[in-house]
Amino acid sequence: MRNRAPQVSLQNAKLSVLGREQRDFQDRSVRKSRNADVSGVIEEEFGKYLIKAGILSGNSVARAFPRPPAKTQAMIADAVGETPEMAIEALKEILEERDKKRNDQRRLEENTGTLVPSEREYIEALRQVRFTPAQVTMLRALSIAGKEGLTIGQLSQAAGYKSREASIKVFKKAGLLIAEYLELDIPQPGPEQNDGAAQIVAFSHIESDDKPATWIMHEELRCVVRSVL
């Protein structure tokens, strides 16, 4: 008796073809622009985004991803148009509106005058920025400390640094990485305990002259660190 050929439904066949088309577009999109004649994909940097445009299932599609060296390449937004170039222009308008809305939603920190990003912005930044193990430890320690905060000495101890200066440098760098990804204006540097880049992560609080300053992480970031890092 002959074996029956496996039954393949038309719906499954369509899904299989669509899946291949999507994979083909993704594969093409990671190639360099020098291979554009072969792949048909256009790449263009736009602020903190990398836009990739091409033909997908007969449609001109543009997609925005975090610009390298981001940790992942998750898609942020997309748009369609009559041509890939028109799709890119439509996507730029979407991204500009996205950034404007986010900027309007930032909270003004009264202690320092810093504009604090929303939880959604912090989530995106923490998922994309490459922190060192020491920076992750510091961020986690500050989030656990909550409103009590930690002194630089306590942060140094948590991250395993004997040098206070080294731990301050690492701490400031964490704030700078977030600021660079979110394109935040870094506050003007002040006293050592109130340095601009560090204010992206936390604000400095001095209870009295005979006690060291404590760093208190912004509430929006505390919630995010616990869920993302």
Image (spheres, rainbow, N blue to C red):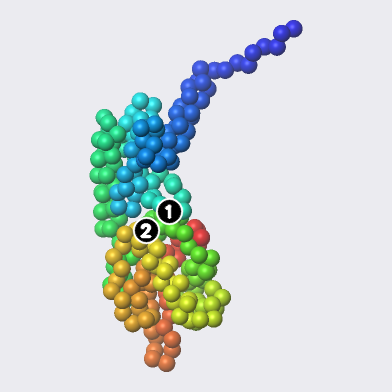
Task: Please identify the residue farthest to the right as the structure is shown.
Answer: 1
Residue 112 sits above or below residue 178 on the image:
below
Q: Is residue 161 left or right of residue 49?
A: right
> Which quadrant is home to the N terminus?
top right
Residue 204, labelled with which disc?
A: none
Task: Please identify the residue farthest to the top as the structure is shown.
Answer: 1
Q: Amino acid at mark 1?
A: Ala
Residue 42 sits above or below residue 220 on the image:
above
Q: Nearer the viewer, residue 113 or 219?
A: 113
Q: Is residue 21 left or right of residue 102?
A: right
Residue name at image x 47 percent, y 33 percent: 23
Q: Is residue 4 left or right of residue 148?
A: right
The x, y position of residue 11, in whole percent, is 50, 20
- Whether tag 2 and tag 1 are in contact, CB under 8 A, the answer is yes
- SS at circle 1: loop
* Alpha-carbon span between mark 2 and mark 1: 9 Å
- Identify the residue under disc 1: 70
Q: Amino acid at mark 2?
A: Tyr
- Identify the residue under disc 2: 181
Query: Does the rendering let one see residue 195?
Result: yes
The x, y position of residue 160, in whole percent, is 56, 75
Residue name at image x 26 percent, y 30 percent: 82
Residue name at image x 28 percent, y 39 percent: 88
Q: Nearer the viewer, residue 33 or 56?
A: 33
Query: Does the rendering let one see residue 219?
Result: no
